Amino acid sequence: MNKSSTVEEAYPRGLLRPELFVGVLSSVSAQAVRFNLNDAGSPSASHFLGGRYGKGEVGEFVLIEGQINLLLGRVVEIHLPESERRSVDNSHSKIVDLDAVGTIQLLGSVAMDSLRVVAGVESYPRLGDRVYAAPHNFVADLPALMEPEGNPESTVLLKLGSIDVALESAVSIRPEKLFGRHCAILGTTGGGKSWTTARIIEECLQYNTKVILLDATGEYRGFSGEHVTHFHLGNPVNRATGSNPAVLPPTCFVESDFVALFEPAGKVQGPKMRAAIRSLRLAKLVPTTANSGIIKKINQSKRAVMAAEQQPGVAARLDDPHQEFDVDKLIAQIEQECVYPEGFAASPSPKGTKDPTMWGGDSGEVSYCLSLMSRISAVLTSPSFECVFNSSAPPLTSAIADFISNKKRLLRICLSGVAYEFKAREIVANVIGRHLLNMARGNEFESRPLVVIVDEAHNFLGRQIGADDAVARLDAFELIAKEGRKFGLNICLTTQRPRDITEGVLSQIGTLVVHRLTNDRDREVVERACGEIDRSASSFLPNLKPGEAAIIGADFPIPLTIQIFPPETQPKSDGPNYQKHWYLEP
């Protein structure tokens, strides 16, 4: 509903229709009210203006005609007094005067003049106040009616679903409300999570948007058109038509990424690997200090290295985790780090005199680093990291930069070809996330806000890799959730396991699109992440139909349940066809 339109223009037939009368209040408390059902004995629901109304069914939105304003609520329970319950049998439809009582959870207040909706109860109703089923078009307008006063009229709206099959009940949401404080799409397998993601992407493609999709399984490869571009890392089995190969260059990796990759263990491996990385950075910054790309240290003079470290700006860059180095030389450099810190002075100094400007000989610590060196070699040559260390494809960083500057609207990055060995998927996704965050910090998205959709986010977020001596946290998306919003970078997470998403991330999510959740721990996570929902509202989550979702969040203080419109480009997430593949011809 346009905020500038009058109530009569928006709802010419009025909100409190006699045809939608449900009953009258019989009890009022701080959290809920009870009402006597007018049509408790009716054998079925009724239809009005093309929409179906239960007129007292559990889950139905209702309006209470208060003394000062209207109250919006939801029916959460219907029951008969104990003395009347025996009157219900298979012929109860003939009993028109059933003494049924319903419980309504109070959700918000509705101003009678402007119909603006606010969470909470401004004025409690009185006994005898009348209850009406809320018209579907009014419920569909709730996202607009909950807008703060003074907000400009919206021209960019994402039409996601409907309250009912009636056309006038379509729900449209401003992208600021959906993505502005980050978004998460939650739901068990088969609940419609992928459909919702695809529908949101289709709606975004109708506008001048910038969306990057990290496709973990390749199920969104069906998107096509002039505004869509596909890139893939590794060798996915199913590729989108026209998908381009890409490589994630090692220069995108920081020291913590290599700690996560190579997992140095013990008290020797970690310090030696970090020392080797520092030496290789110096070899890159001051090539004259290196021999074949590495800095020789065994019984060698320190003078050239010490002089290079004193050059302007070099010392600070040596300890910069983003400073690049040649990772292919890491094993050879670790061998050079296994020396005594001081060597013996050359003659004519007295025999055994230490010289602080010399490194000593082999300290024997190489034996402690053999397992680390073997792992480094295995990672560098593993097919899992072919998209990092052994590919001649163009860099993904360039593809992202081109996407931000061109007229494309969707960049899909397929990760299904990245193997699971060595935590490759988690590390690669984290590196991409950090690269986007660094771009955001450089104000790359100031004029073109970017939404990053992370599919199967539970595989990538909140991961911690390494032993106690060298722990690396994969926290790029957690940092985006905490600070990306102010730079025009927002994330939309999709997952079937909310309990595996860290509370640090979920606490930053402003909007939750929740499909069916059957696990108690998952529902508890949703309740903790969003204070506006309580057990009365979350009790509906296990019973949502496929494709039905509850929209909850800071910008949706009143939970709104809608049926998501089927996307035109449906995700390719079907399981195996057992009837086809297991059938034996007689």
Image: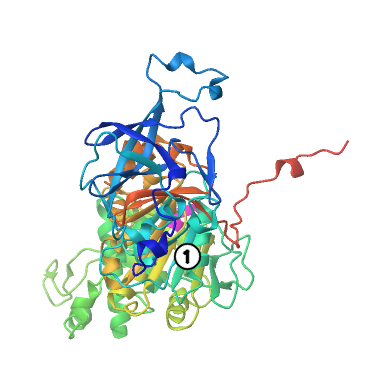
- Which quadrant: the N terminus? bottom left
Q: Is residue 412 visible?
A: yes
Q: Residue at x 32, y 69 (%)?
A: 437
| Helix, strand or loop for disc 1 | strand
Q: Which residue is nearer to you in this view: 98 or 1?
A: 98
Residue type at tag 1: Leu
Q: Quadrant for residue 578, please give it.
A: top right
Q: Percent position (x, y) of residue 39?
A: 46, 32
The answer to if 469 sits in the magenta stretch is no
Which residue shows up at 42% across the image and 71% down it? 156
Question: What's drawn in magenta, residue-wise?
Answer: 420-428
Between residue 525 and residue 5, name the one nearer to us. Answer: 5
Graded by Cα atoms within 10 Å as few (under 14), some (14 to 19) or many (20 or more), the crowding at tag 1 reads many
Q: Quadrant of residue 579?
A: top right
Answer with left or right where residue 227 lies relative to residue 320.
right
Please name whichever residue, 341 or 316, is drawn nearer the observer in this view of the structure. 316
Residue position marked by numbered label 1 in the rendering: 213
* Image location (x, y in percent) of residue 137: 45, 55
Query: What is the x, y in percent for residue 30?
Result: 21, 36
